[in-house]
Amino acid sequence: MYKKKIVFLSNHAAFFYSHRINLFFEAKNRGFDFHLIFGSGSSILMEKNAIKKIKKLKIQNTLYHFNANYSFIKNISALMKIFFFIIKYKPDILHSASPIANFFAAIIAIIYRKTKLVLSVSGMGYLYTNKLNIMERLKKKIFEFFFLIFLNNIRNKIIIVQNRDDHTYFNKTLKINSNKIFLIKGGSGVNFRYFKKNKIIKNNKNVLMISRVVKSKGICEYLEAAKVLKKKYPDWNFNLAGSLDYITPDKIDLKYFNYFLKEKIVNYLGFVEDPLKLYLNAEIFCLPSYREGMPKTVLEASAVGLPIVTTNTVGCKESIVINKNGLLCKKKNFIDLSVKIEILIKNKKLRNRMKIFSKKYAFNHYTVNKVTNTIFSLYEKS
């Protein structure tokens, strides 16, 4: 009996495990063959942890050394190896996620036309979140030019986006027909069987941010907002969890970062493998990111039942219902961020109302089963 084959192509093993492991389980349940291809991780700690779990699950996988920070020659070499693997493996579906993996998948699909390309846009990467120098702006233009050509010459394709802005970007900027673009509001989804077992959050005085410690996640704004608020509310704690060893042009200055730790303005918890306890012991969740697809940490915080403060920017603004389970602040503006956090600090009744709405809304919109079933229905779509 013939088994359908899926190849999932991801920049990092850590991203696949945290955001797309549900696809492996569903493929296994449906009797599909599944093979993971991933590049070189930007965080040694996160990648080591993810690879260990992937091996434990006995997921067929191959590491090819590609990374946005690598040289052009090294990335082209990895692309060629992936291409020859695809020709040999002959997948029915090539599903990619994360920027460089999506670019590689588009190149492969335009040459190897026997596979269906499913391209997931979970974020647009460094070139879309930061102020760029001349060379970076040129790189972005080249990326968009070739991406436009490749995608518009692939007949059998599906583009999955997580917010309306990215839908518009692929439709208007990259000229993709709207019937090839599908918006899945739930992002990568939340496993409610795991979250619903936990007790209602007790009132405490903890503000929490979970993210990679890089500038584009709004780390600097969070630190500065904490500095403002800690003076006014010394009994409140500002906690931060996430990997600090991320290799990227977007990295934060360690001397600057350590100042906030030394002065005990922010409690840095490091990389936390299972952050559920952090969510449960928080009163407010904060993610002042510059741009997202659909932020997974916000969805998880909502599932636990937390009020949210996030930025009025792509992805983030669609992850909450304004004034119902969260507040929006201006991007790259720590003063506005501190004002919005303070509104929640001062108003316990508002926080409690938001907690109730947050959990109900997340359950209705963000369940991982709903997201997974939608993706597999797109695999079957002609």
Image: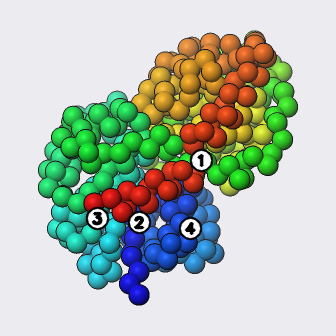
User: Mark 2 or mark 4, which is nearer to you?
Assistant: 4
Residue 22 falls in image quadrant: bottom right
Amino acid type of disc 3? Lys
Amino acid type of disc 2? Phe
Q: Which mark is residue 25?
A: 4
Residue 194 spot, x, y in % from top left: 72, 53
Tell which of 82 and 224 is nearer to you. Answer: 82
Q: How far is the residue under mark 4 from the one under mark 3?
A: 20 Å
Give the mark, 4 or 1, whose residue is nearer the N terminus.
Answer: 4
Give the mark, 4 or 3, whose residue is nearer the N terminus.
Answer: 4
> Looking at the image, can residue 94 be seen?
yes
| Mark 2–mark 1 CB contact (< 8 Å) | no
Residue 249 spot, x, y in % from top left: 41, 43
Amino acid type of disc 1? Thr
Residue 102 spot, x, y in % from top left: 32, 55
Residue of label 3: 116
| Mark 3–mark 1 CB contact (< 8 Å) | no
Q: Is residue 181 above or below residue 307?
A: below
Q: Which mark is residue 367?
A: 1
Give the mark, 3 or 1, whose residue is nearer the N terminus.
Answer: 3
Name the residue: 44% across, 26% down: 313
| Mark 2–mark 4 CB contact (< 8 Å) | no
Name the residue: 16% across, 51% down: 152
Q: Which mark is residue 128?
A: none
Amino acid type of disc 4? Phe
Residue of label 2: 8
Q: Is residue 3 above or below residue 157?
A: below
